[in-house]
Image: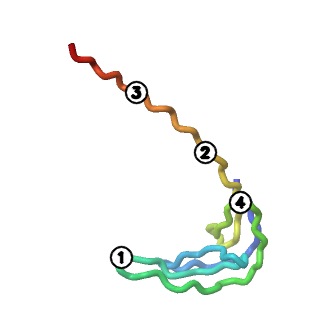
Amino acid sequence: MAKKVAKVGVKKEKGFLYFIDKDGDVSCAAMARGDKKGGKPKKVAKVGIKKEAGFLYFIDKQGDISSAAMVKGGKKKKAAKKVAKKGKK
């Protein structure tokens, strides 16, 4: 379950990737498409949130910063059954 950390209200533009940078601010960069490389990140909003370990921080649909607990380990895979080889006589 995600919870809101900060109300920012960032308006997202098409073709840009929005993320929380290492300073806890909202930044954006042009997305890489085909042969074109991505653009240099620029700060959109100065927020300065402190990130907690074990949480994922993201920009939600309203343009605010939200966080969700990360899954530890995930689901275990079942062991594959070994197929018995038929012996030659």
| SS assignment at label 4 | strand
**21 left or right, relative to 89:** right
* Classed neighbour count for the residue bearing mark 4: other residues with Cα under 10 Å, few (<14), some (14–19), many (≥20): some
Q: CA distance from mark 2 to mark 4?
A: 15 Å
Q: CA distance from mark 4 to mark 1?
A: 32 Å
Comes first in the chain, label 3 or label 4: 4
Disc 3 designates what residue? 82
Mark number, residue 55? 4
Judge whether 1 appears above or below 57 on screen: above
| SS assignment at label 3 | loop
Judge whether 22 appears above or below 40 on screen: above
Comes first in the chain, label 2 or label 3: 2
* Classed neighbour count for the residue bearing mark 2: other residues with Cα under 10 Å, few (<14), some (14–19), many (≥20): few
Where's residue 48, x and y in %? 77, 78
Mark number, residue 34? 1
Q: CA distance from mark 1 to mark 3?
A: 43 Å
Asked if the residue under mark 1 is in contact with the one under mark 2, i.e. CB atoms within 8 Å, the reply is no
Where's residue 71, x and y in %? 65, 50
Disc 2 designates what residue? 74
| x 57%, y 84%: residue | 41
In the rendered image, the residue lying farthest to the top is 89
The quarter holding residue 43 reads bottom right
Comes first in the chain, label 4 or label 1: 1
Where's residue 61, x and y in %? 62, 68
Asked if the residue under mark 4 is in contact with the one under mark 3, i.e. CB atoms within 8 Å, the reply is no
Where's residue 58, x and y in %? 65, 67
